[in-house]
Amino acid sequence: QSALTQPPSASGSPGQSVTISCTGTSSDIGGYNYVSWYQQHPGEAPKLIIYEVIKRPSGVPDRFSGSKSGNTASLTVSGLQAADEADYYCGSYATSNDFIFGGGTKLTVL
Amino acid sequence: EVQLVESGGGLVQPGRSLRLSCAASRFKFDDYAMHWVRQAPGKGLEWVAGISWNGLPLGYADSVKGRFTISRDNAKKSLFLQMSSLRPDDTALYYCAKAEDTFGWTSFDSWGQGTLVSVS
């Protein structure tokens, strides 16, 4: 299975919204509602921020939202804050008991 | 709060073996599938292997199939990864991660801090 496709970088000013895309195939994103998103700050472990496409774990601000259309999932961060500057990875369950991640997107808050 | 603590990493020569461990606490370990995810220096995340709550392997990444074996000991609340025939491209920070639900594949809701494996 090839990695899911994410843009290498994204940016926005404080208070703005930014959307990060994650493109796969019908064997992963398009075939299951098991898309998740992870935030990783430098030197830290990844943190789950979205699961099952649209759900937020307890404690994750509602500024983070997820969606999916066909083989592409998206993460939207609204009301950008300096603390949102991090790497973001999408992930999805894939056919034949596999799990694949995207290559990651570095979000810069200008 | 869930706690996952990995250990066992280190510097190893190509072709040799290494066994990673992950000690779990503060949740009912035997209710959840568990996974290993790795991250090469400066690179992205790569899923390595997963195991069901009752010890059945869920699967392995093609890159490690036949070389790595995942296992668990529910009585000791521990997860393991036996790595053999190690290659330089196995060099990475290895994370232990807890599955979010009983299906075991939807997402990983808790992560350890990782243990570094260097193959050289």
Image (cartoon, rainbow, N blue to C red):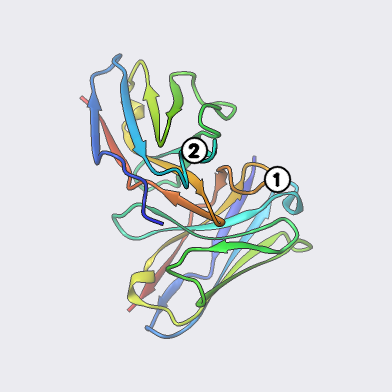
The amino acid pointed to by label 1 is Thr
* Residue A5 or residue A55, whichever sits in front: A5
Left or right side of B13 for A9 = left
Left or right side of B107 for A104 = left
* Residue B37 or residue B18, whichever sits in front: B37
* Residue A26 or residue B41, whichever sits in front: A26
Give percent across and percent down for residue A31.
51, 41
| Up-down relation of residue B54 to residue A50 (above or below) | below
Disc 1: host chain: B
| Up-down relation of residue A78 to residue B102 (above or below) | above
Which residue is situated farthest in the right direction here?
B75
The residue beneath circle 2 is A36
Residue at 64% over, 39% down: B1
Where is residue B76, by image quadrant?
A: bottom right
Mark 2–mark 1 CB contact (< 8 Å)? no
Residue at 45% over, 47% down: A45
| Up-down relation of residue A32 to residue A62 (above or below) | below
The amino acid pointed to by label 2 is Ser
Q: For mark 2, does the 10 Å Cα neighbourhood hold few (<14), some (14 to 19), or many (20 or more) residues? A: many
Secondary structure of the residue carrying tag 1 is loop
The residue beneath circle 1 is B102
Secondary structure of the residue carrying tag 2 is strand
Give percent across and percent down for residue B21.
59, 66
Quadrant showing the N terminus of chain A: bottom left
